[in-house]
Amino acid sequence: MVGVTFRPQGSDPATGLDCVGLVWAAYSIAGCVLERPHGYPLRGWSRAQVEAGLVRAGFAPAVGDGREGDVVLAAYPAGQFHLGLIGLTSFVHAHAGLRSVVETPLDDIMRGAARWRPEQCPPRYD
């Protein structure tokens, strides 16, 4: 989905994605359909509210070593939280400033960020 247009509240790769829509679309394509949250703000939620939303959607904190495809919950200044998907060497996320889904090199901040994964979808080893 790298290159898909950024769109606030976007949940369809054909019309645009935000960070939440990207995560849900990626898991759906991988065969793990989760209930997607609606009506969330771009800013202003507390970490507790974001984490509660992840739990309601079927995610749990990742325990042990991180895996490719884990969801990263990154905290930015001014109370903004961001979700993306982590790989071995990269981070895929919907970048509002660039107006696109991008893949960036994995940095120390993302390596150390909280990771989440769906409880009901087992990992796939293709």
Image (cartoon, grey):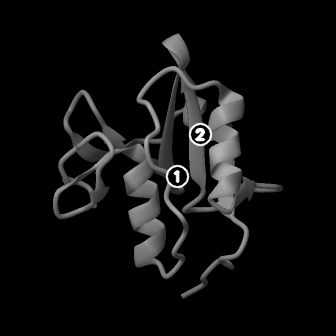
Residue 5: x and y in percent read 18, 48
Locate residue 122, reporting x and y percent: 68, 79
Q: Distance between the residues labelled 2 and 1?
A: 10 Å
Kindly identify the amino acid type of the residue bearing the numbered disc 1. Answer: Ile
Task: Give the quarter of the figure containing the C terminus.
Answer: bottom right
Residue under circle 1? 86
**Residue 20 appears in view:** yes
Left or right: residue 122 compared with residue 98? right
What is the x, y in percent for residue 52?
70, 43
| Outermost residue toward the top in this view | 78
Describe the element under mark 2 as helix, strand or loop.
Answer: strand
- The residue type indicated by label 2 comes to Leu
Q: Do the residues labelled 2 and 1 touch (CB within 8 Å)?
A: no
Q: Examine the rendering and report whether any part of residue 91 can be seen.
A: no
**Circle 1: element type:** strand
Which residue is depicted at the point 38% across and 55% down? 22
